[in-house]
Image (cartoon, rainbow, N blue to C red):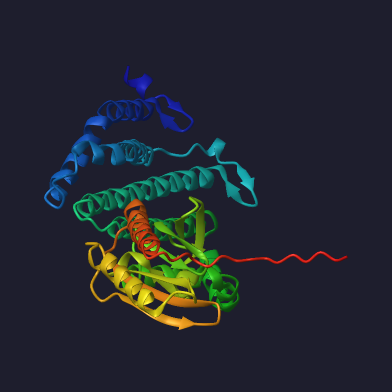
């Protein structure tokens, strides 16, 4: 039996292959329990930061990458005691042997696994912060968390890509790339000028907060509700229910009207009366309109009703009043009530609004 275990296959005794198989089988059998144990330990360390978070949410994020990491780590630690078979150490390409290829593949697998875990940890931290943000009414906090989650994941991915380049091509290429980036930084910055400006604009939006998610805004010819603030652009649901994407640079540089921050709503209308209207009747009409506005609880004090101007055909009556912030059907109902009240007052005073007449002359 001892001689059988010492029998060499591809430069390594059978005993080593058995140890490798046993280790992998044991780790494969207990990897789920070990992963749950590590995840539970991490959950116990952070659960006081967000009591709303559940253990299964952390397990859902970290379980699979931890299982893969444990299995890969056990394989790498065990295979490290193996002697690479000389007969298999053939040259693959330009002095690059099969032994170098296997070592490089294991390094890449380990790097990808660590990168996977780091990305999932960022997702978990963002999940904790989102649970805290859900306790507040401000939707911008949630969007702020999503923004920085994507930002840090992009940074980690770039660093992971650089590490993979170093594994594949060596540190000399990485140094050359860094030097090349230094030389071509101006050209790169010029080519990505718009993207960089939009990224800076997103930071300005999040820190200066000229508007937030859920606010009703008007920028240029677009008016609607802000639904998302991203790394590059802001998405607005317009009054026509279309979905408009506006670059963040434009949201920062343009004159933006945040309708949600209004303290009052202003209504301005002009009423044209015929010049045949006696001055006494005209004065009574002005008083009637003032009474209509005064008796409406939604109209704020300080309204204006006056004879604004006149010409040879009409008297121009100006009606300006402010209301509380009411939207949609309530605002339409208020305008309708005021307008109907003015029409009834005109009817009671026997005043008809002037009509446009078109004289058509027929030639002989």
From the top left corner, tell me how far across and down residue 182 is, in percent.
53, 76
From the top left corner, tell me how far across and down residue 359 is, in percent.
70, 67
Question: Residue drawn at (41%, 67%), measured in percent from left and top?
Answer: 202
Name the residue furthest right: 364
- Name the one closer to the observer, 197 or 42: 197
Whether residue 106 is visible to the viewer of this picture, yes or no, is yes
* Quarter containing the N terminus: top left
Question: Residue drawn at (55%, 71%), measured in percent from left and top?
Answer: 194
- Name the one closer to the observer, 98 or 161: 161
* Quarter containing the C terminus: bottom right
- Name the one closer to the observer, 337 or 274: 274
Name the residue furthest left: 48
Indicate left or right for 128 with 320 as reference.
left
Q: Quadrant of residue 19?
A: top left
Whether residue 262 is visible to the viewer of this picture, yes or no, is no
Question: Residue drawn at (30%, 41%), measured in percent from left and top?
Answer: 61
From the top left corner, tell me how far across and down residue 214 is, in percent.
34, 57
- Name the one closer to the observer, 318 or 167: 318
Indicate left or right for 262 with 195 as reference.
left
Q: Is residue 110 above or below residue 36?
A: below
| Count of numbered circles on the image | 0
């Amino acid at each position: 039996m001892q001689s059988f275990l010492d029998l060499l296959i591809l430069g390594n005794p059978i005993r080593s292959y058995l140890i490798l198989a046993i280790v992998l089988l044991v780790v494969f059998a207990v990897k789920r329990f070990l992963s749950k144990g590590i995840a539970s330990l991490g959950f116990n360390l952070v659960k006081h930061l967000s009591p709303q978070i559940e253990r299964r949410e952390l397990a859902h994020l970290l379980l699979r990458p931890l299982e893969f990491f444990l299995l890969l780590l056990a394989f790498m630690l065990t295979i490290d005691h193996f002697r690479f078979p000389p007969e298999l150490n053939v040259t693959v390409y330009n002095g690059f042997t099969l032994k170098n290829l296997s070592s490089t593949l294991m390094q890449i697998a380990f790097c990808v696994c660590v990168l996977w875990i780091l990305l999932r940890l960022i997702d978990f931290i963002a999940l904790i912060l989102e649970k805290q943000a859900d306790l507040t009414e401000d939707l911008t906090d949630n969007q702020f968390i999503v923004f920085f989650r994507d930002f840090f994941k992009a940074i980690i991915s770039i660093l992971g890509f650089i590490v993979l380049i170093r594994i594949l091509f060596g540190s000399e290429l990485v140094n050359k790339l860094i030097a090349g980036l230094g030389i071509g930084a101006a050209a790169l910055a010029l080519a990505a000028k718009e993207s960089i400006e939009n990224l800076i604009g997103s930071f300005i939006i999040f820190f200066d907060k000229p508007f937030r998610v859920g606010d009703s805004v008007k920028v240029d010819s677009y008016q609607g509700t802000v639904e998302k603030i991203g790394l590059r652009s802001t998405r607005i649901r317009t009054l026509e229910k279309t979905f408009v994407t506006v670059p963040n640079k434009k949201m920062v540089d343009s004159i933006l009207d945040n309708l949600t921050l209004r303290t009052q709503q202003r209504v301005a209308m002009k009423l044209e009366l015929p010049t045949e209207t006696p001055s006494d009747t005209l004065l009574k009409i002005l008083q009637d309109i003032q009474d209509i506005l005064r008796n409406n609880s939604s109209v704020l004090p300080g309204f204006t009703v006056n004879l604004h101007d006149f010409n040879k055909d009409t008297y121009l009556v100006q009606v300006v009043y402010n209301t509380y912030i009411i939207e949609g059907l309530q605002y339409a109902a208020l305008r309708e009530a005021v307008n109907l009240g003015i029409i009834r007052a005109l009817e009671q005073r026997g005043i008809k609004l002037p009509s446009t007449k078109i004289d058509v002359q027929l030639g002989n």
